[in-house]
Image: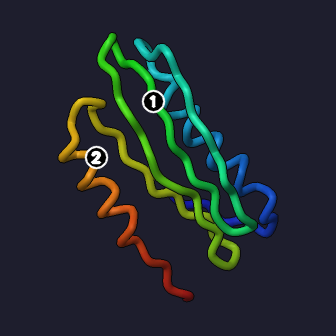
Amino acid sequence: NHMHTSDPASLQGFADGVVKGITSAEGVTNVEYSLEPKTATSVPISGSYKLNGNPLFFSGFAKLSGNDIYMVAAVWPMDDDAAEADTQRVLDSVQFRSR
């Protein structure tokens, strides 16, 4: 996901809005998440929820790069250790380049 802004303070609101978008679907319960530890240019997201009784994890981050905010996030089944490892590898490999 991507957003253009001139207000770096909107980074936290953007991250929170994405999480609420992920977790507001019909059948979602037991939502728990954190947006910490944040910095001036990055807000991590991590949490869990149940979708129709199936437990899921999600993880990612919102990143401010110049006047652009980028969001990278993934969702996977709570009992899938391989998916969790793959997700972490992908998140760790994300790089942003200046335009």
Task: Classify residue 9 as left or right of residue 89.
Answer: right
**As displayed, is residue 2 above or below residue 64?**
above
Residue 29 spot, x, y in % from top left = 47, 14
Task: Classify residue 49 as left or right of residue 53.
Answer: right
Q: Residue at x 75, y 67 (%)?
A: 40
In which quadrant is the C terminus drawn?
bottom right
Q: Earlier in the sequence, mark 2 or mark 1?
A: 1
Residue 27: give its label.
none
**As displayed, is residue 73 above or below residue 33?**
below
Residue 98 spot, x, y in % from top left = 56, 87
Residue 15 spot, x, y in % from top left = 62, 48
The three-letter amino acid code for the residue at tag 1 is Ser
- Spatial distance from mark 2 to mark 1, Cα to Cα? 12 Å
The three-letter amino acid code for the residue at tag 2 is Glu
For disc 1, the marked residue is 48
Picture quarter containing residue 4?
Answer: bottom right
Q: Residue at x 64, y 63 (%)?
A: 42
Density class for disc 2 (Cα within 10 Å; few <14, some 14-19, many ≥20) is: some
Picture quarter containing residue 18?
Answer: top right
For disc 2, the marked residue is 84
Density class for disc 1 (Cα within 10 Å; few <14, some 14-19, many ≥20) is: many
**As displayed, is residue 21 above or below residue 59?**
above
The furthest residue to the bottom:
99
Residue 49 spot, x, y in % from top left = 44, 24
Residue in front for this viewpoint, 70 or 94: 94
Q: Residue at x 42, y 40 (%)?
A: 58
